Amino acid sequence: MHAIVDAFVLAVKLIFTGDAEVYSITARTLAISGSSTIIGALLFVPLGCLIYFNNFWGKRALISIIQTCYSVPTVFIGLLVFLVFSRSGPLGFFGILFTPQVMVIGQVVLISAIVTGLTISGLSGVSPAIRETATSLGASRLQSVWLVVKEARFAVLTAVLVGFGRAISEVGLALMVGGNIRGYTRVLTTAISLETGQGEIALALALGFILISLALIVTVLANRFLMTKEVNIAQSRASVS
Amino acid sequence: MSYLILHQISIVLGHFRLQRISFAMESGQTLVILGPSGSGKSALLETIAGFNNPFEGRIELDGENITVLPAEKRELGYVFQNYALFPHLTVEQNIAFGLRKDPDRMHRTAELMNFLGVRPLAKRKTSNLSGGEKQRVALARALARNPKLFLFDEPLSAVDATAREGLRDELRHFLRTLRATSLYVTHDRTEAMVLADILAVIRNGTIRQIGPASEVFTHPVDSWVAQFVGMQVLRPEWVKFLDKDTAQVGIGGSTLIAQVRNLDARQGMVAFQPEDVLVTRSDSQLPAGENTIPLVIGKVVPLGPLVRIDLIGNVSMTALILRRQYFELNLHPGDAVNVRINASDLQLVPEVELETP
């Protein structure tokens, strides 16, 4: 218990005394996981829509496979990405192993299933009558699809946030393809792993607190962004009544 | 030429088939499609709306063949179960949704909101509206594009019984006022009775009977339709045909005269509405008369202004009488009564497999 309190105090100190290394690791973590989440969202939310809105042979099986991939270990993804981008791998000519870029690529692969699958689940939660009503009101296929996506926006945002959570919290992949190079590919999770290995438990815990705070801030900001419109409408409703 | 014509429409949806559906209706009429769950009534509506593709048959609306026309170009006003209002849009945005390309959309939306009395709700989201408000918004939204045909897919099925009556009356008023041509799908026979000009009873993907609502409710084509529209169905002990329209039937040891309906074979079931069962005390001074069966009152169930009397004896049946009449006749469980069903109210119909509707 004492260690946790010490760690919390240390975390606050590190944040408010402007520890350059901690700031740099935090910024890098945010940049890498943020980039991978944005790229993942741009790729896999549309993929989820594509799968949900089209009927094809093997659709159910594909969705089952995607859902199974939610729990693929990060080290396995790390190993695959390592093999692909290692010097002798098929994409080794890019020479990006042990760089932040390959960490982003790895995290995009890592969150692909979760963002796609949860997007499909979110869209399934919208009544088919919504889309059919839109069509009967003259909406084109694209317009009615967009309407359903807007109806499922909270579920889609959740899919993206869960993806972000998985990306920012993973350690195996970051270690394997990033190499935990100080000042270059060290992120919060790899730093925690390193400090724990060196017996700096308080520092490791402090970095853990920062990591959790970061995830919390991003989630709150994302929710606020979506809720703004709801609040505006609620206020206008109150003024009407 | 009829306004809406369906000619031999057949579709396959997985293991379900809608088989050779044909009917025609005139402009301004309301056709109610009545059937149990899984009978294909919603599938039929979706086919007319363009969401299902028939593999054979033709649909004509206002002289135009729309069988292969995309759903968004059919100019229909579709009102779904629970109204399917768009939750993230306001009332005003919901109504204006179908008017995206209309330069006069704001004016038209305001006009519709005034017409249906939802103007004060314009900026509200739809999730907190009452059932009546939701219905009016859904109607305004469907009306916005001046649809050639309204399609209602059990809009009142999830509404509680108290609200349903008011909403049903309001809907009837709306349809009659606008002389809107509409197809209305339901499994509720009261809704069908209130709204229908024409009634189609559907079962297992085929229309069993179609005709004026009053005709279907009083002259069902077979025992299944009779049961589904709320009639009691009994197997007679014997049948003796007097001519092609009338027969004598033995029920509960008594001889009754019944009308014969569509009966090719020599077997049939007798069908009658419980409200057509006339009950008198057997110790009253009135003569028992024709078409009478002596029975005993079993259970009595008050149903608001009506009383349901379960009658037992050589045969069991149910009578529905006014509550006031029940007390005037001084009836009690265990009393011996004479039960009369007029020959004009007793139908001998072909027997088909019965099921719980």
Image (cartoon, coloured by chain):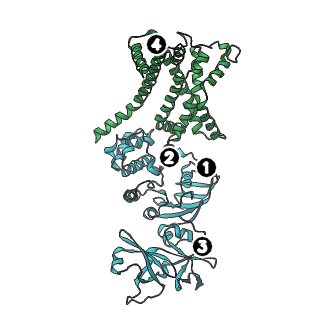
The alpha-carbon separation of the residues under discs 3 and 1 comes to 34 Å
Judging by the rendered image, the residue that carries numbered circle 1 is B53
Q: Amino acid type of disc 1?
A: Asn
How packed mark 3 is, by other alpha carbons closer than 10 Å (few <14, some 14-19, many 20 or more), is: some
Q: Is residue A154 shown above or below A32?
A: below
How packed mark 2 is, by other alpha carbons closer than 10 Å (few <14, some 14-19, many 20 or more), is: some
The residue lying toward the viewer, choosing from B155 and B19, is B155
Judging by the rendered image, the residue that carries numbered circle 3 is B351
Q: Answer whether labels 1 and 4 touch (C-beta < 8 Å).
A: no
Q: Amino acid type of disc 2?
A: Ala
Chain coloured green in this rendering: A
The answer for which chain carries disc 3 is: B
Q: Is residue A49 shown above or below A14?
A: below
Judging by the rendered image, the residue that carries numbered circle 2 is A129
> What color is chain B drawn in?
cyan
The residue lying toward the viewer, choosing from B281 and A70, is A70
Name the secondary structure under disc 4: helix
Give the mark nearer the N terminus: 3 vs 1.
1
The alpha-carbon separation of the residues under discs 1 and 2 comes to 17 Å
